[in-house]
Each structure stands twice: as C-alpha cells, then as structure tokens.
Image (cartoon, coloured by chain):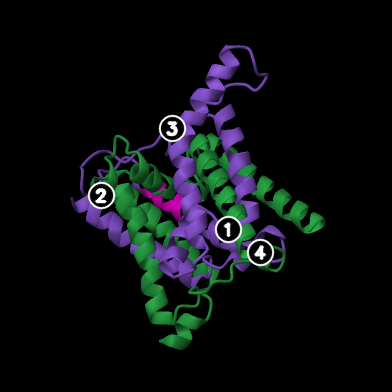
C-alpha cells in the first residue's frame, strides 16, 4: 500500500517535470531527433548521472519500505532487445513521443496523444500473441525470421 | 507562478529530478522506475499485480495526473488539437491512422525489448546493465534514422 502511494506521488512529480520540460510537445523530440538541440540528451544524461551515483550509494543498504537489500543484476543483450528496440525507435521517430511523455501529454489535454496512447496499449496487449506467432513460424521452418520471445519487462 | 511555469524547465533541473525519482524507487523498495511496466500491468498484469493493485500502474496514473496538474497551473499549453509537423502533410484521419500505427510499434516494440526510454534509457542504463545500454543506443539510432528518413521523403 505504501509503495503504491509512493509510486503515485513519484508519478505526479515525474509527469509534472516532464510537462514543464516540454517533453509533452512533439516539437521537443523533433529538435532532439534532428540533432538540432542537445537539450533532451543533456536532460537524460544528467538523470542517468544522478541515478548512477545514487544507486551506488544505496547498493547493499536495506530498502526503507520493504527492508530488502538494494541490489540489481546486469542483463545481457538478446535478439529481443535489439528487435524490439528497432520497432520502438521507428514508432518514436514517427510519433515523436515515447510512453512516459505521452502519458503526461494525455493529462495535459493533447488530443492526439490519446491516439498514440491507444496504440501503445494495444501494442503492449498484442505483443505476447505476436511473439508466439513468430515462434510458431520459426519452429515450422516457414520463416527465416528468427523467433523473438520478448525480454522480461524491467 | 505562471511566468515561471511558462518558461521551459532547464535540463539541469529536470534531469536530476528524474534521477532522484529513480533513486527514490530503489531506496524505498528496491524497484526499477519504468513506464512500460505500468502499461503492462494496466492491460495484463505481472508479478507486481494487475491494474490499481500494481504500484507500476499507479506510477503511470501519477504521470497522467502530473501532466494534468501542470496544465492547471500553467494554462494548459498542451491542450490543443495540433500535434506535430505531420499536421501539415496529413488529413486528420490520416494523422490518426499514422499515430495509432506508431503507437502500436512503440507498445509492441518496447515490450519485446523489455522496456522503454525510462526503464532501459534512464534506470537500467544508470545501473550499467549492458542489455539496457545496447537497447537504448538501438532505440536512439533508429529514432534518429527514422526522423532523417521522414524529413528526406516528405
């Protein structure tokens, strides 16, 4: 229960921040992806830098709510990571949106963010069926496309 | 208040705030910040729970509410029908179709890859997981390539 309340509050903080940084405006990602503006790369880089340092200070300590030791494991890149990331990147390039900022844009009243969000929901829902289909095709030898199972969602 | 909120939040403030959100999830419960997990738990569920029983869905809901809160305070700069530079090239129906298709690619792709910009790009890149660093580089390269290709064709 406490974790769920904390997640809601941290979500509000993230959504507000992302909106204020104008990541809810597709023009922001357009300027990023045409390499006209370094702003979002710097924003993401500074987020990673802060999280990198914070995570290492916390490693081995106990989590405040659950008491479990704070730790993580490294994962190796697989075909699923590569294939899925290519699909995601194409979708991002077309829509100039990714899931987090789209959710915030939805709250901010950007009408067509609703269409992107609907597509994301349907895509996430359909993915296991698509993965099973790709596995069946590859097992049946009818396709040269290798099976893509999908990586565990972080 | 309005004038402060009207100006774009600087990257060196927004980025570290998102970094601290990531650190907070680790410190509270040894959890990974990621938006795609919220979408997954909304439409299907996981070991974290389903729907509002999952903290990840509440994170997603919080992001939407954060976008709404920013809109209330800042005069709703995102509340509009226009979307992106695609507006000038497509009818409304065409744009809806293209954005829904892009959303499908984002949803199915990110779930296949096991994460989106927040999970792979920010959180697990900061945890130096090779799968996430490679995923994020693939996502960025594909998104940039798609943007340049679209600009060249349209």
Would you call the spot at circle 1 few (<14 residues within 10 Å), some (14-19), or many (20 or more)? some
Chain letter of disc 3 in the image: A
Q: Which mark is residue B52?
A: 2
Q: Which residue is mark 4?
A: B91
Q: State the residue in front, A144 or B31.
A: A144
Q: Position of residue A116 (x, y in %)?
A: 52, 55
**Separation (CA) of disc 1 from disc 2:** 29 Å
Q: Colour of chain B?
A: green
Q: Secondary structure at mark 1?
A: helix
Does label 4 lie on the same chain as label 1? Answer: yes
Between disc 1 and disc 2, whose residue precedes?
A: 2
Subunit under mark 4:
B
Name the mark on residue A152.
Answer: 3
Q: Residue at x 53, y 17 (%)?
A: A136
Q: Are marks 2 and 4 on the same chain?
A: yes
Q: Which residues are magenta?
A: A50-57
Question: What residue is drawn where x is 50% and y is 49%?
Answer: A119
Disc 1: which residue: B96
Q: Quadrant of the C terminus of chain A?
A: top left
Taking the view exactly as shown, the residue that stands out farthest to the left is A1
């Amino acid at each position: 229960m406490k974790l769920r309340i904390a997640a809601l509050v941290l979500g509000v903080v993230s959504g507000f921040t992302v909106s204020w940084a104008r990541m809810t405006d597709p023009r922001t990602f357009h300027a990023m992806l045409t390499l006209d503006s370094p702003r979002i790369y710097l924003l993401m880089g500074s987020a990673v830098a802060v999280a990198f340092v914070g995570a290492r200070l916390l490693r081995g300590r106990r989590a405040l709510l659950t008491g479990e030791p704070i730790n993580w494991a490294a994962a190796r890149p697989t075909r699923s990571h590569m294939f899925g990331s290519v699909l995601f990147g194409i979708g991002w390039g077309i829509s100039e949106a990714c899931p987090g900022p789209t959710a915030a844009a939805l709250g901010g009243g950007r009408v067509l963010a609703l269409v992107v969000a609907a597509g994301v929901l349907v895509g996430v829902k359909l993915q296991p069926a698509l993965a099973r289909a790709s596995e069946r095709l590859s097992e049946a030898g009818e396709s040269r496309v290798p099976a893509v199972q999908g990586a565990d969602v972080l | 208040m309005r004038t402060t909120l009207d100006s774009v939040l600087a990257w060196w403030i927004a980025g570290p705030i998102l970094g601290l959100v990531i650190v907070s999830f680790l410190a509270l419960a040894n959890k990974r910040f990621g938006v795609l997990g919220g979408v997954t738990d909304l439409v299907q569920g996981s070991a974290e729970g389903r729907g509002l029983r999952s903290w990840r869905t509440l994170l997603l809901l919080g992001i939407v509410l954060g976008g709404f809160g920013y809109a209330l305070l800042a005069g709703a700069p995102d509340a509009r029908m226009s979307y992106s530079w695609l507006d000038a090239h497509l009818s409304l129906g065409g744009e809806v179709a293209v954005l829904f298709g892009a959303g499908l690619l984002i949803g199915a792709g990110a779930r296949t890859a096991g994460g989106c910009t927040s999970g792979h790009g920010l959180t697990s890149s900061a945890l130096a997981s090779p799968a996430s660093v490679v995923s994020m580089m693939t996502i960025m390269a594909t998104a940039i390539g798609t943007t340049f290709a679209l600009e060249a064709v349209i």
